[in-house]
Amino acid sequence: MTATTAAVEDPEAGPPGPHDDDRIPGKFPPPRGTWRSQLHRWDVRYSPYAFVAPFFLFFAAFGLFPLLYTGWASLHRVELTAPDRMTWVGLHHYARLLSSPFFWNALCNTLTIGLLATVPQLLMALGLAQLLHYRLRAATFWRVALLTPYATSVAAATLVFVLLYGRDYGMVNWALETVGFGPVDWQSGTWSSQIAVSSIVVWRWTGYNALIYLAAMQAVPDELYESAALDGASRGQQFLHITVPVLRPTILFTVAVSAIGATQLFGEPLLFGGAAGQKGGASHQFQTLGLYLYEQGWFDFHLGRASAVAWTMFLILLLIAAGQQAVARRLRRGR
Amino acid sequence: MPSRTRTRTSAHRAGRQLHGGPFAYAVLVLFAAGSLFPLLWTAVAASHDNTRLARTPPPFWFGGNLGRNLRTAWADAGLGPALGNTLLVAGSIALGTVLFCTVAGYAFAKLRFRFRGPLLALVIGTMMVPPQLGVVPLFMITARLGWTDRLPAVVMPTLVSAFGVFFMRQYLVEALPTELIEAARVDGANSLRIVRHIVLPVARPAMAVLGMLSFVQAWNDFFWPVIALTQENPTVQVALTGLGRGYVPDQAVVMAGALLGTLPLLLVFAVFGRQIVGGIMRGAVKG
């Protein structure tokens, strides 16, 4: 017993260490410049960098560096079988892209599928958000139900839609035939296949965008609607003249995000194409830029060409971003 | 004009107070059904067999083969190991994202340091850059590190997210009182103590939401896993791609595979749907 108390009291009996400074106030005033206050100062000054360092390290290694190095690789001949051997070819891959009908085909397909997927999606999302904004029974249920497609992976969703869009036994054609329309070949037709692929995107993302619009609507002050209702504005008029103008920045944001997503479209057309999905259909009718990149790199084994496609996509993205900025600036000035 | 307002009985209370009419419910029922139908039909198709799916009209109700098809998908089509891999991958990514983004978000929200503004601008600026533009060098890097066809190849590049940093920063700017941190500093607490005992408890609700969002995203990540992994060691999405390419000719088994790959997330949604909806909406307002 005595031994343990002695052990506990021992440090206080000994010469005052740095830890004792604050326990005995006044007796040993903490001198400025000791290693402890120095440590404290370093901690305050450098810990923020330590906190942001992991993010920026990972981001630099796996985000920024690959993005920039893609530009460098696009100026070289690099083959999948020997990715370490790079031969300088200058702008050869870009010249080849611009003269390739498959590239222009993929670019056009990306644009049309992008429009077919984005425009109806955002319009429906806007309408749905207005409905969700009403006071509803089981409000959470509707929101979660509309968001469920977002939880479904591209792969799982596309596999189901492939069956639903089957030419001979699919449910869509069965339904069309019962109301008197001929069967549509959703696989080989150009427009039909692009509509089918777009519909998968629309299905997965409409609810998500509706929630984003809903969030923006809830930030609109109720008085605006109240005074409009007093002035006799109908629900439709309120929607057009209050909701849409207030939501403009949000709409612009979702347009930009959807446009960026559309340029990257990959999984839906890949799986919709079945066994040779990277081609985007037998006559490349729904091959997107993403698929074209994949085909060049991992089926034709030309990583350099794939990099050139990637940087072209990056360029398109910068154009979209610049367009969004320009529109946003004009909106701000117009107000 | 009291008479005019009184005639508009449904619109006399405006904005959020407005009750949904029958039309609103009808449209919502339609869209909810459209959202849920493909998932429900996945289960229906997975409960039949290939010959039944090659007949019109297509089946509308469950058949008796669900168990057999699920077993075939689990064992023969390799969905079992793929699910294990995906759980590991998505779990690690969610953990890493939450940890790294919380401390970085805290630094951006409450601490002073040089280059804070430019660095935050960099985070926001890269939020919209799709990572798949860098796949070629990423592929070279992982090959050189010896990660070809191994799970680190899909975990490491996705371990942090610019959105996550921004999301946590926006939350902590408001939720974390600066005086609390200053008081702890005066009491001599070091940075790690402050993070552990003040920041993390305050950040917990947002961390949970970010964790769920990252988990869902990692579970469904497609482009990079399809390039980085093969059917030897797949995630669920890679295995489903194999099914889609016709490695298994039986469509009912393919549907059973799609069902197996989706069910875990549907369970997460059934339990945490409200929180996920709230998280997406919160991220939207600030974004």
Image (cartoon, coloured by chain):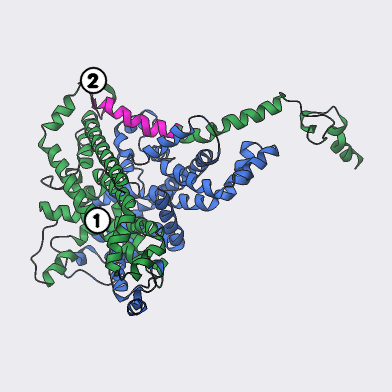
Image check: B273 left or right of B68? right
Q: Quadrant of residue B233?
A: top left
Q: Disc 1 marks which amino acid?
A: Ile
Q: Which residues are magenta?
A: A57-83
Q: Residue B30 in the image: x percent, y percent?
A: 27, 69
Residue to which mark 1 is pinned: A200
Please identify the dominant SS of the magenta region. Answer: helix
Chain in blue colour: B
Q: Residue A218 in the image: x percent, y percent?
A: 40, 60
Chain in green colour: A
Residue toward you, A278 or B195 = B195
Image check: B33 left or right of B176? left
Q: Disc 2 marks which amino acid?
A: Thr
Residue toward you, B19 or A52 = B19
Q: Quadrant of residue B164?
A: top left
Image check: A178 left or right of B218? left
Residue at 16% from the left image edge and 69% from the top image edge? A175
Residue to which mark 2 is pinned: A87
Instruction: For marks 2 and 1, give the CA distance.
Output: 41 Å
Q: Residue furthest front?
A: B1
Disc on the earlier residue, 2 or 1: 2
Queried whether the magenta region covers residue A154, the answer comes back as: no
| Contact flag, marks 2 and 1 (Cβ < 8 Å) | no
